[in-house]
Image (cartoon, rainbow, N blue to C red):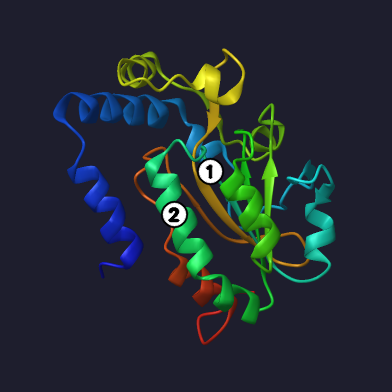
Amino acid sequence: MITPLKARTEALVSQIDGAFRASMEAAFAHLRRSGLETGAKEVGDHAPHFALPDPTGEMVSLGERLRAGPVVLSFFRGEWCPFCRVEMEALLAAMPDLTAAGASLMMISPQDFSETLVARSRDVPGLTVLKDPVNGVGLQYGLVFRMPDVQREALLARGVDLSQVYGTDAWLLPIPATYVIRPDGTIALCHKDPDYTRRLDPTEIVASLRGPTAII
């Protein structure tokens, strides 16, 4: 089934030129060979607890959110990434269904907060936007990698310098990942893929939280 999110990501892929697409495929192959995906936290694992700052500077902990109900935890590369932007929009559109199921959404990125994210974190019930400045939480979940040279060079050629975006020359970032975490801290559903064009559709998240296919 072609969902709205999948349709949008496929449309983005169709706009990528051949040279950049080749750099993406080379980077994806490199990451799969590294075993990063298989080493990341998986269904049945206990979700590592953490506390990170929100846009107001307040430290928000996963444990605090889990005491109120299940948590949807989304790791994203940053607003510079068009695939992350469309996923964020899809998740925000699903917020009424998520909150109706008793869940909250925590979105984590190493990028500084934009005015847009600050406003959304303030105005959208059930949403918390957090900054992982040194990818410490991403490392706990086994998601962080150093961008392969082929992709770094392709981004630089297009004017995207992640050393400026993240404020560090390390070029470290998480693979996009989504976790649905039960109140007891165990992971009920996860999606992690070195191919950052593939994202978990919010309809699958909502289905995991309520209805005949619920796993919470």
Q: Position of residue 106 (x, y in %)?
A: 66, 55
Left or right of 176 in this view: 123: right
Q: Is residue 44 visible?
A: no
Q: Which mark is residue 142?
A: none
Residue occupying the point 66% across, 30% down: 135
Q: Position of residue 119 (x, y in %)?
A: 64, 54
Q: Which mark is residue 76?
A: 1
Q: Position of residue 45 (x, y in %)?
A: 67, 52
Residue occupying the point 38% across, 14% down: 149
For label 2, the SS is helix
Residue occupying the point 57% across, 40% down: 40
For marks 1 and 2, give the CA distance.
9 Å
Q: Is residue 40 visible?
A: yes
Asked if the residue under mark 2 is in contact with the one under mark 1, i.e. CB atoms within 8 Å, the reply is yes
> Would you place residue 87 above or below residue 113 in this image?
below
Within-10-Å neighbours for mark 2: few <14, some 14–19, many 20+: many
Left or right of 54 in this view: 29: left
Q: Amino acid at mark 1?
A: Phe
